Amino acid sequence: MPVRHFLTLTDLSPEELDQLIDNAIALKKGWRAGEVRDSLKNRVLAMIFEKSSTRTRVSFEAGMAQLGGAALFLSPKDTQLGRGEPIEDTSRVISRMADAVMIRTFDHETVERFASVAATPVINALTDDYHPCQLLADMQTFREHRGSIRGATVTWVGDGNNMCASYINAAQQFDFNLRIACPEGYEPAKALLDDNSERVTVIRSPEEAARGADMLVTDVWASMGQEDEQKARAKDFAPYQINPELMSLAHADALFMHCLPAHRGEEISQHMLEHSSSVVWDEAENRLHAQKALLEFLIIGA
């Protein structure tokens, strides 16, 4: 049986994604009930970090522990990757020793090259192009609070970054409509928009994009590696803040999400994380449970 990888949401079928979300919800309930689960006993996840992390590291490491397995933290300065060993050579070695490999890096080509020769599943835990693990948590959170997202309208407010790209993939895989409110010049990749034109619309006005939506979601204006653009981006994105006024234009029971970390007073107003529509803390916790379901799916086919 060929090795399955998770580099973008499109690596799994819509049916597999639905089953994975169902399992994530079940795992969460079991964990909260104090159930002990050792489905990944004696299994090892290698975690390669070239970008800093809080939620990704804690969720994957805790997730493996809760399933009876173990996780290894690897950084470029601690491995031969930092000394110029070819990605493919590192992949061939690590994937023979670990049951899965999680990579958080800059260039999406890095995870593609790593996966191309890996003997075990490779998980994209964030690249500059995509962040599919976050979308699993977001889709789980919506389902827990509002049921199926199929046919819903989601509004992305902000940069056409890796999170936005993964929301475009999610619109296809989970069957919802996506509005993207961003300034000119900050759109997602044209090819990605063209391939999903039936369900994705770019709208300049955040107010128009928010009107009647079932969920509003955003991210920081300057991602890791774009710190030198912070001032220019702050000016360009100033009208694109999610705040109670913008939220009031959405559906009465619309949800608000943010992948965190958040810059209060920039992409969101000072107290937006505590707004009645916010499910951000559930969303953050669900990184743990969605990734446990993903690990079970990839490692043991559960």
Image (spheres, grey):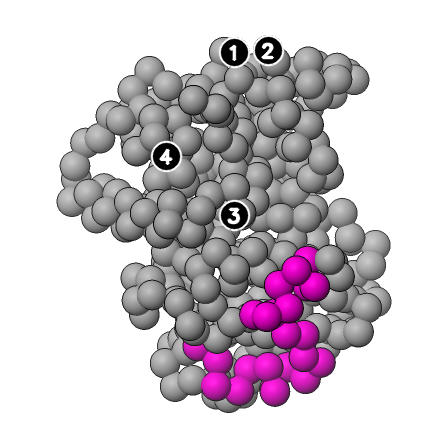
Sequence-first tag of 1 and 4: 1
Q: Residue at x 23, y 47 (%)?
A: 26
Mark 2 and 1 residues: CB-CB less than 8 Å, in contact?
yes
Sequence-first tag of 4 and 2: 2
Please determine whether, in this image, residue 284 is positioned above or below residue 70: below
Tell me the magenta residue range. 192-214
**Residue 106: % across, % down:** 71, 40
- Kindly identify which residue carries mark 4: 297
Q: Residue at x 70, y 54 (%)?
A: 223
**Residue 110: % across, % down:** 70, 32
Q: Residue at x 69, y 18 (%)?
A: 88
Q: Secondary structure at mark 1?
A: helix
**Residue 63: % across, % down:** 37, 35
C-alpha distance separating marks 4 and 2: 23 Å
- Kindly identify which residue carries mark 1: 96
Mark 3 and 2 residues: CB-CB less than 8 Å, in contact?
no
Q: Residues within 10 Å of mark 4 (few under 14, many from 20)?
A: some
- Kindly identify which residue carries mark 2: 93
Q: Quadrant of residue 144?
A: bottom left
Q: Which mark is residue 111?
A: none
Q: Residues within 10 Å of mark 1 (few under 14, many from 20)?
A: few
Look at label 3 and name its amino acid.
Answer: Leu
Q: Residue at x 63, y 74 (%)?
A: 201
